[in-house]
Amino acid sequence: MLTAEQFSAKARALKVVIGVCGSVSAVAVPHLAMWLKASLEITNVDIIVTAAARELIGLPILEASIDGRVVTDWRTSADDRVTHVTIAERADLVVVLPATANFLAKAAHGIADDILTTTILAVTCPVVIVPVMNEAMWKNKAVQRNVATLRDDGYDVVPPKAGLSLATGRWELGSMGDFRPIVVAALTKALSAPGTTLTE
């Protein structure tokens, strides 16, 4: 069992990728990135933003919250080619937060039509998926089949918590809740993964 100091010392060497899908909960991602930096001293973070997420959150705030790259497409600049392979090879942990029903369906069926879904297919490190959607969508049989498939394939899918739905105005299942315990659990899994390569 690692002490808090030992955990922090090892965790700060992890290379983390955060995948952001088109949910209003995407607004929590800058807070997550800044918490990783301020509380755990994890600065080696890249963020992959889907096209739908870009409609909900501005890229400048994401860029300001990390020391790594914000990737929206195959290329971030004219002289810096970024592919699913280069991102996947350096990752010790991928956290998709928030994950939409659309992302769950594509990942469960191996569809790779953007930089995030293609990266998911290329990584060998632990992948933690944090779905956020309204309760009716979460309980839909198709969504639950996709979740079961993802878990069978070795992905960690974190069940949503109860929260206030912006769509219905009701308190219902579908929120990610406090992201900190989820991320700490994900980091712990990454630290114990056999393929993790830590550099001080």
Image (cartoon, rainbow, N blue to C red):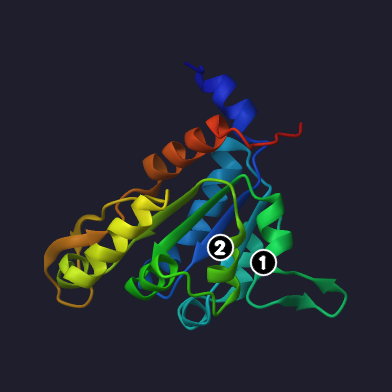
| Number of numbered tags placed on the structure image | 2
- Taking the image as shown, residue 81 lies to the left or right of residue 22, namely right
Q: Residue 45 location in percent, x, y?
A: 64, 52
Q: CA distance from mark 2 to mark 1?
A: 9 Å
Q: Residue at x 45, y 71 (%)?
A: 21
What's the residue type where badge 1 is placed?
His
Q: Are marks 2 and 1 in contact (CB under 8 Å)?
A: yes
Q: Residue at x 45, y 79 (%)?
A: 56
**Quadrant assignment, res 69:** bottom right
Which one is in front in this view, the residue at disc 2 or the one at disc 1?
Answer: 2
Give the mark nearest the N terminus, 2 or 1: 1
- Asked if 92 appears above or below 46 in the picture, the reply is above
Q: Which residue is mark 2?
A: 121
* Element assignment for label 2: helix
Foreground: 41 or 132? 132
Checking the image for residue 84, the label placed there is 1
Foreground: 9 or 37? 9
- Asked if 21 appears above or below 30 in the picture, the reply is below
